Image (tube, grey):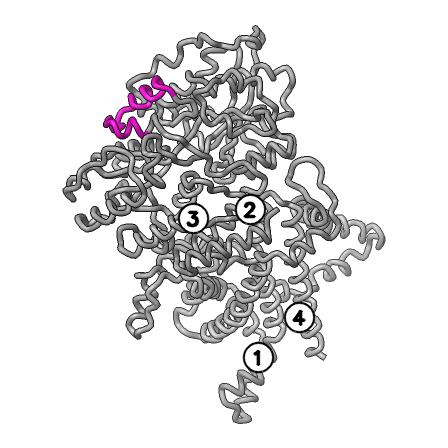
Amino acid sequence: MTMATDAPAVREVQPGGSRKPRNAMRRRNTLIGWSFILPNFLGFGLVTLIPVVFLFYMAFTEWSAFGDPEFLGFDNFTRLIGDGSFQTSLGNTLYYSVFHIPLTLVAALSLAMLLNTKLRGVAFFRTAAFFPYITAVVAIAAVWSQLFSADGVINQILGVVGLDPGVGWTADSTLAMPAVILVSVWRDTGFFMLLYLAGLQTVPRTLYEAARVDGASAWQRFWNVTWPCLRPTTFFVTVMLTIQSLKVFDLVFLLTAGGPGQSTFVLAQFIYQKGIVEFEYGYASAGAIVLFSMSLVVTIVQFLVNKRIER
Amino acid sequence: MKHHVMRSAGVAIAAALTLAACSSDDGSSSTPDDTGSGSGDEPVTLTMSAWSLDSTPEFQLLADEFNAINPNVTVELQEYDAAEYDTQITADLSAGAAPDLYILKNLKYFATFQDGEQLVDVSDVADGVGEGNGALDFYEVDGATWAVPYRQDTWFTYYNKSLFDEAGIAHPEGAITWDEYADLANQLNDGLDATGSYQHSWQSTLQGFALAQTPGADLFSGDFSFLAPYYDRVLAMQESGAQTDFATVQTNQLTYQAQFGTQEAAMMNMGSWYVATLIAQQESGEAEDFEWGFMPAPQYDDSTLETPVSFGDPTAVGINPQIDEAKMDAAKEFLAFVGSEDAASALAQIGIKPAFASDAVTEAYFSVAGLPQDELSQFAFGTHETLPENPVSLDTAAIQNILNDAHSAILTDSVSVEDGIAEAQERVANEVG
């Protein structure tokens, strides 16, 4: 949502007070600026930045929270490469992302287009679509767990068309991940729909009118007008979704706890388990750096691709 | 980290003590074998970690009972979150902000604290605690003792006498084997609307027994074949319907309290802490009103029926090495007290199974209102060998996590018993140590 308001706010202040010397003016503005940023930045620095910087050091050590960390060099990273659990978690995270990103994107865009019409009561449906996103994830997990149980609503509906798998989804090693993906798509759609709704408002009406005059079909209007105009939104949505997918944790943990076996064991849970549960903070940090690097690389690639298309 | 002493705890204890309403005065009598050395005239205040003070009266009880004997020493409680206790106390110890005394909530992390030099050697205290405290040995590393246990839970089989009567099956009269247990569950299942047996989804409900009971079973051997017969039996029970299947327990998020307390199951294996819970829930109406008792947990074979083997983790108190040296004597005295028969009798009176076992403790325990008074329950409480669920090692947590994955995979039929165990063995070889 940061993209909607680009820059002008700060610039507008300057031409106003022309009597004061420029330097004092600038100093005052800088101070005001800092005073706005500082409280937030202090919090960010203390609870995020410093721990993250420390993490880069910890990843090269062995540390159980007691005593001094012991420097290991790249040992943690070589251990990661050979660690079966790490490989499984990496595979599961990619499996999750490959489905979660496009499905959420399509669902969010479709819903946004549907709710971008001037219908009576559309505000209600927009709000309703946003509900899952603001609902506590614990509640979501509890309810969906019931829905996915062997004799739950979902299997009953599937039973009508003869597709009842006969098992609880979250207790089946092949169905657990699809269940997790389904719930997270349902949960995230509302938020990304909102971004797309904002994006849709920026598409000039005149383009649609021109396209219609030229005899473009609904599909052609979408493909040649809506989609290109939404590119900045889509870019932002994709970046956010990718990062969110790679670091998925809470929903998976509450819905399946990584199981059955390791069938939904994701990277973030690997880090949690090694660090918080097994007290291997150094090794967990190495895992966290891998996750961080993955997010960083994917985001950079997305930026580059976006730039190339822009040209 | 600001965990302040919660004075309101006293009110909660008063409520919890309704359990022990019948015998309240003998705890305040002075101990004859008081070690006596450090209780000088100057007042000493010790701080100790604790959790969920509203529902867990044992900490305040220990503090109050000790204060009654040693009026100069006050033990103040510092409250932590129950679910995140191990993480929070680790953070506090690491930051130098932990209290003088801290509780080792389970045996799993004892090795981490001991290896991390976060415990004071209390071998001198241990020497005075005596034979009756059976869990003391678990805290021995390199010939020294590092903490003193006050509580030792063990696993029993709870059974619903009313449902046994309804099914026309005689009440059990002594310890039984697992095969007999499975037969009994099937019989009950046939004669009742309720299921014969309920087994909660925790790995310990199966692996804890297999590890403790199977001759030669060793968590660190890398060989987990000892689990196989236990899984085969449970899978057969799930198949026949005599036991609610694992997937249902998970997806429907069943609670063991409701399953046994509302008579959904006729038998259930569960830790000794459930005795006090069930009494309280029957009193409050959360659980239905029915006759129940507990017997020793089922055995591997009939060679251990005289002294049944079960498992359970003790709870202990250790001393933070950063304690003020001037308080050390008082801290050690407190440790000597928590491991003693006096503390045990006081704990027993609020329905807790203490680490110190004796006839007097058993008597105190069965004086709690609402406790079944039959001989089998008394036998189960007083006679057993309890082995640790989590034998002490730095690798325990990692191995248990891998076995937990195997547990859910096998019981949901995602893999066969053999493959699940083989995979766990491979992972332990590959990922641990």
The amino acid pointed to by label 2 is: Ala
Of the residues tagged 2 and 3, which is closer to the observer?
3
Q: Secondary structure at mark 4?
A: helix
The amino acid pointed to by label 4 is: Gln
- Residue indicated by mark 4: A302
Say whether disc 2 or disc 3 marks the residue closer to the N-terminus.
3
The amino acid pointed to by label 1 is: Trp
Q: Residue furthest front?
A: B303
Of the residues tagged 4 and 2, which is closer to the observer?
2
Report if the CB atoms under discs 4 and 2 are less than 8 Å apart: no
The range drawn in magenta is B358-380
Q: Residues within 10 Å of mark 1 (few under 14, many from 20)?
A: some
Q: Is residue B236 left or right of residue B220?
A: left
User: Which mark identifies residue A292?
Assistant: none
Q: Is residue A284 magenta?
A: no
Q: CA distance from mark 2 to mark 1?
A: 49 Å
Q: Is residue B362 magenta?
A: yes
Q: CA distance from mark 4 to mark 3?
A: 49 Å
